[in-house]
Image (spheres, helix red, strand yellow):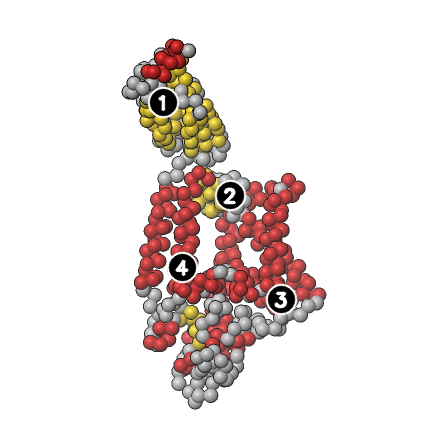
Amino acid sequence: MATCNTSKCNKPYSKSRYTAFGIITLIAFVLPFLRIGGNHLFLFSFDKKQLHLLFTTFDMQELYLMPFLLILLFLGIFFMTTLGGRIWCGWVCPQTIFRVIYRDLIETKLLGIRKNIKNKQTDSQNGIKKVIAVCIWSILAFLAASNFTWYFIPPEDFFNYIQNPLDHTVLIGILAIITGFLIYDVILLKEEFCVYVCPYARVQSVMFDNDTIQTIYNEERGGLIYDEHNQLINTKPTGENDECTGCEACVKICPTHIDIRKGMQLECINCLECADACTTVMEKLGKESLITWTSPNAIESKGKTQFMRFRTIAYGIALSIALVALFLMGSTKEHMLLNINKTTQLYKIKDKGEEIQNAYTFLFQNTDHKDHKYYFEVDNKDITIVKPSAPFKLKSGSKMKKVVILKTNKNLSTHAKDDTLLNIKITAYALDDKEKIIVFRNTTFIYPSPSSVKKYLNK
């Protein structure tokens, strides 16, 4: 019969889980306020059409980083699931954290609507305390909704906007919708969201293998409760060496209302509350918990979980590549943006064909955190700038359209009948920081054919 030192057996996952909840909540609320030089650690601003990442601001035209962020997100989910099953659901997911706050903290600990947190199978009764619980959660739901919007509208703007709600009805509407959903979700939908709504529960099973860490009931020690068809045999195993007492503490405490002794189920969120419940019972008998966080192979071989395997190594390598690519792409950020478009008029012939002009529309954008004066150069010495004739100032974060006219007084034609397309390079820069703020763009200068010039002169 398996025995253990009770001090070693008692490993309350709940304490670690609550610590993780506290750290995650603190990070979620503090992160939007972290800024250096006006740049946020992370912000996807719909309002200003910017992405802030690692205290660097990227304009919408620089959102080539988004695919890498999405790749990192999905690869991270795949890696986490392959390694630790639904560890996200039980330890990180906001839905789980919100339910613990409402059910265990507000209803049970604060108001005493529920007798204790060890029985989650009976719903709380309606009454004045229930109304108080709903009111408290409504305030917290609004705070959570506000925290969510801070990742899309920076807090410094958010608090200014909500002071004038009539001028920002879209923001107020979004806050109301998110708050209403959180109230409905946590109070009425509850864990049904995890079972029937969340898509993660549906995709997790295809990512599991026999080395994936899961919440597992040890049938070899505890005994069979269900047969191979998942039909209940007995609430308490009848074998002489079966250690399960049939107390069903693991069933009563389960937030998704399953019996973990039936085996891995879609509803299990790896919260490990059943493991804590079993530990409390079994340590009184001087035995190890029958429910542990381990892998099927580790149970079968009575060894350790194989963490380093093909799937985890492959996902780890893919994650590393995506992370390196993200940093490399992020390091190439341009502190100014420039788009060049030619006007509909290909060229203009002046001074009896001695001067040829091309007109363009340059869209400059200052993506730096300071104001700068800008100008540009053309790499072809035979082509000069007519307009603008002098540098111009552009404030931080602002855009400016400039009509640019380039000219040449030399015959650059290389074809007798066709127009000549000359490839030129535009070098635009900030006069006060040319080494850092400089961009290069390629465009064309069109020189008319001799026949076109002759036709123009004849007119």
As measured in the structure, the alpha-carbon distance from the residue carrying label 4 to the one carrying label 3 is 35 Å
Q: Residues within 10 Å of mark 2 (few under 14, many from 20)?
A: some
Across and down, in percent, residue 202 comes to 47, 63
Q: Nearer the viewer, residue 216 or 359?
A: 359
Which residue is found at the position 62% from the left and 42% from the top? Answer: 168
Say few, some or many: other residues with alpha carbon within 10 Å of mark 4 (under 14 / 14 to 19 / 20 or more).
many
Q: Are there few (<14), some (14-19), or many (20+) residues within 10 Å of tag 1?
A: some
**Quadrant showing the C terminus:** top left
Residue pointed to by mark 4: 78
Spatial CA distance of label 2 from label 3 is 36 Å
Q: Secondary structure at mark 3?
A: helix
- Residue 144 locus on image (x, y percent): 57, 54
Per the image, the residue denoted by label 2 is 45
Viewer-closest of 284 and 258: 258
Q: Which residue is mark 3?
A: 107
Quadrant in the picture for residue 442? top left
Q: Position of residue 249 (x, y in %)?
A: 53, 77
Q: Which residue is mark 1?
A: 446
Cα gap from disc 2 to disc 4, whole angstroms: 27 Å
Residue sitting at 37 percent across and 75 percent down? 299
Residue at 29% x, 20% y is 415
Residue 16 pos. (x, y %): 47, 65
Q: Residues within 10 Å of mark 3 (few under 14, many from 20)?
A: many
Quadrant of the drawing holding the N terminus: bottom left
The earlier-in-sequence mark between 2 and 1 is 2
Vertical arrangement, residue 271 with respect to residue 343, above or below: below
Q: Is residue 429 above or below residue 184?
A: above
Say what amino acid the circle numbered 2 marks. Answer: Ser
Q: Is residue 223 above or below residue 350?
A: below
In primary-sequence order, the first of circles 2 and 4 is: 2
